[in-house]
Image: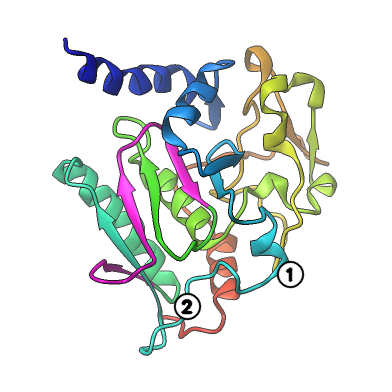
Amino acid sequence: MDFKTTVSLLPLLLLGFCNAHDGNVRKYTKYCFLMISSIFVASTDFLLEGDVIIPTTRNAMKCASNTNSCLWPKSANGYVEIPFELSDSYDDTEKKAIAGAMRELQAKTCIRFITHTTQMAYLSLEPRSGCASLLGRTGLKQVVSLQRYGCVQHGIIQHELLHAMGFYHEHTRSDRDSFVKISWGNIDPVFTNNFQKQDTNNLNTPYDYSSVMHYGRTAFGKNGLETITPIPDASVPIGQRNGVSKIDISRINKLYSFCQKNS
C-alpha cells in the first residue's frame, strides 16, 4: 500500500473510533477526534463544537448577534437558493441519499438547493474525514464534509446542512439549563467546549428534544457516561438522526421568513 493511500485511509480508521453513531448515542475516543479535526480543518478555520467549523475571519457569535450576517439571501424568484456541488466520489446510492435529504427540506421550507454554476458562495459536499460543516453562509466556497460509510445518512446530512444554514446544536442554546442538565464531571475534558452555551437566536420556538440538532445522552462522555439529561423528565429521548423535526422546520421558516414559503 503506497503512502498516499495509507494517509487517505487513516482518517477513516480513526472515524470508526471517534465519530460512530449508534442509535441515539454518539461515541468518541479521547484525542483521536482531535486528530481527525486537524486533518479536516484547514489552518484558517477552528472548531467551535464537534462538527461546527468557524472561519477565523468570523466571530463565532456573528450569526446570533447580527441576524442576516450569515444567512443565505433571497433570490429574485422569492426562494432562498443555496448553490451546491456534489463530489463525484459518492456512489449512486449516496447521491440519492443526499438528494433525498435536500428534497425533504425543500418540500417544507423556502430553501432551494440548486446546482452551482458561477456563484461565489456555495456548498461543496465532499467525503472528507468525519461529518462537519461551516456555520452559516461564509460568502465563498464552503465544504460540508460527509464521510462515506458513516455520515451519508438522511438525518446526518440534514444536520450538517442546517449548520450551513446558520443553526447551532440544540443543547447549546441560551436557555438550555431549563431543559437539560449537563453533567460536566462526566464529559471528557478535551471536549468540554462542545457543551458551552451560545448566544443564540431561539426564534421564539420551544426547546426541542427531538431536534436533529440535539446531541445524544452520552455525547463526549468518559467511558460512555451520560453527559446530557433531559429535565424534568429524564426519560425523554434525545439525539435522533432520523431527520428534521417539526420544530426544526418551523425554525428554518422563521429564520428565513423573508422568503417565499413553499405551499
Q: What span is in magenta?
A: 112-134
**Which residue is rendered at x = 67% and y = 62% of the image?**
62
Residue 14, by quadrant, is top left
Residue 152, by quadrant, is top left
Which type of secondary structure does the marked residue at label 1 adopt?
loop
Instruction: Residue 162: say if magenta.
Output: no
Image quadrant containing the N terminus: top left
Say which residue label 2 marks: 73
Q: Is residue 252 left or right of residue 64?
A: left
Position of residue 148 measured from the top left corner of the image (x, y, whole percent): 29, 34
Instruction: Residue 119: say if magenta.
Output: yes
Is residue 22 visible to the viewer in this orientation of the structure? Answer: no
Which type of secondary structure does the marked residue at label 2 adopt?
loop
Say which residue label 1 marks: 204
Q: Amino acid at mark 1?
A: Asn
Position of residue 170 measured from the top left corner of the image (x, y, whole percent): 66, 49
Of residues 248 and 13, which is closer to you in this image?
13
**Which residue is rendered at x = 35% and y = 68% of the image?**
120
